[in-house]
Image (spheres, rainbow, N blue to C red):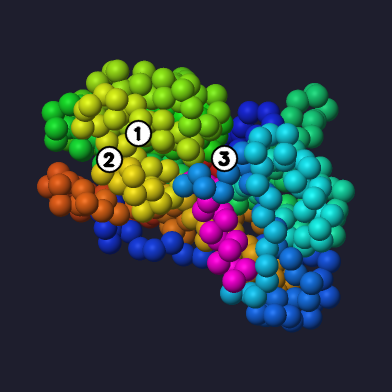
Amino acid sequence: MTISTTKKLAGITAAAGLIIALAGCGSAPDASTSGTPGAGGAVDGFLPCLVSDAGGWNDKSFNESAKNGMDKAAKELGVKPLEFESKNDNDYAPNMDQAVAEGCSLIIAVGFKLAAATVKTALANPELDFAIIDDYADGTTTGADGKPVYDGKPDAPNIKPLVFNTAEAAYLGGYAAAAWSAEAGVNKVGTFGGMQIPSVAVFMDGYEMGVKKYNEDKGANVQVFGWDSAAQSGSFTGGFDANDTAKQTAQGVLDQGVDVILPVGGPIYQSAAAAIADSGKDTLMLGVDSDLAVADDSVKDITLVSIMKAIDVSVYDTTIAASKGEFDPTPYIGTLKNEGVKLSSFHDFESKLPSGLADELAALQKQIISGEIVVESVNSPAGS
C-alpha cells in the first residue's frame, strides 16, 4: 500500500471479534554480551531497560503499554529489567545516562520527546542497542542548509524505531464514530490532541478521513470539530497532562455539540471524561494506544471503542530478539496488515451499534489491507 509521507516538527514523536489479536512486531538489538545462553534463554549479561516519557507508568496509554511488554518479556526470560520513570522532560537525559551506568544492554525510550537524549546516548555507546517508540530519532542533526534532516533514518545506527501508521485504524474509528453520531441524529463528532506532532496528528487525520468515508458511503453530513487535516490545524492542549488546560480544550470541542470525541494524548482522556461528566450529556469518547475500556474501568461506560497500537507487543518482541543477541535496526512499522494497529472491541456497546456497522468495518479493513483503499496521511511514518 502506498502512503504519502512528510516529516515532523523539530525535536520530535470494530466490533468484538472483528479484528484478530495483535501479532508479533519487530526485532531488536542486544549488545555487549558474550552470546552465551543464560537464564530463560537470554545471552549472558543481558539486561533490558526502559525509560518512560513524562506521563508515567500508569498513564493507561503508551508508557504503561510499553512497560507491560517489557515486563512480559523479562518474566519469560527470567531477568529483572530496569525501568526508569521520567517525571518531566528534564529527566530524559539523566535517566538515559543512568541506564548506561547500571549496565543496560538494551535501552528502549518511550516517545518522541526522548529522541535527542536517545541519539546522544546511542552515539556515545555504540556497543549498546536502543529502540525508540513513536519516532525515528532523526532530525537531531542538520544538513548543509542548517535545517534538521528528517529522512526516516535514525541519527545513530544502533537505534531501532518502533512506529505505527495509526491513520489506518483511526480511519475505522472515525467511520464508527460518524455512524454512531448519525444514528443519534447529532451528526457532529470531535477530537483534540496533546502536542501537535505526527504521532498525535496521524490519529486525527485517519479519524477525519473515516468520517468523510462514512459521509460518502451514506450520503450523510457528519461534521468534525477540533481538527482540519487539509490545514493541519486544530485543538491541542500543548502537552500530555490531565490538567485544567486539557479539560478546557475538551470542553471547547464539546461545546460544538459533538456526541463523540477522540482525545489523543495519553492521560488527557481523563480530562475529556471530566468535561463529559460536567456536561451531563451522553457523549462518548474513543480511546487511543490501549483498549481504554479495559485499561481504565472508570471510563468503560463512555468509551465507544479504542484505536490501538501494539506498543506492548513491539517492546516484547524487541526485548526477546535482543535477549538472543539478534539486533536488527530496521524500523518496525505497525499497520492493519501486520496487526500493529487495530480497533478494539466495542465491549458493552456492541449490541447497541447501528445495524450493519460491524460488517462495514470488516469490509473497510479488508480494503485497506489489500490496498483498495489507500489511507494517506502526511503524518504517517516514512515507509508506510
Q: Sequence-wise, which precedes: disc 3 or disc 1?
A: 3
Whether residue 70 is in magenta: the answer is yes
Q: Residue furthest right?
A: 124
Residue span colored magenta: 61-75
Q: Which residue is mark 3?
A: 55
Q: In x, y percent, where is residue 213?
A: 28, 36
Q: Which residue is mark 2?
A: 302
Q: Are marks 2 and 1 in contact (CB under 8 Å)?
A: yes
Label 2 vs label 1: CA separation? Answer: 8 Å
Residue at left offset 39%, top offset 63%: 21
**With 121 as the anchor, is 286 left or right in this view?**
left
Q: Which residue is mark 1?
A: 273
- Name the secondary structure under disc 2: helix
- Name the secondary structure under disc 1: helix
Q: Nearer the viewer, residue 279 or 218?
A: 279
Label 3 vs label 1: CA separation? Answer: 17 Å
Q: Does 172 sit above or below residue 274? A: below
- Name the secondary structure under disc 3: loop
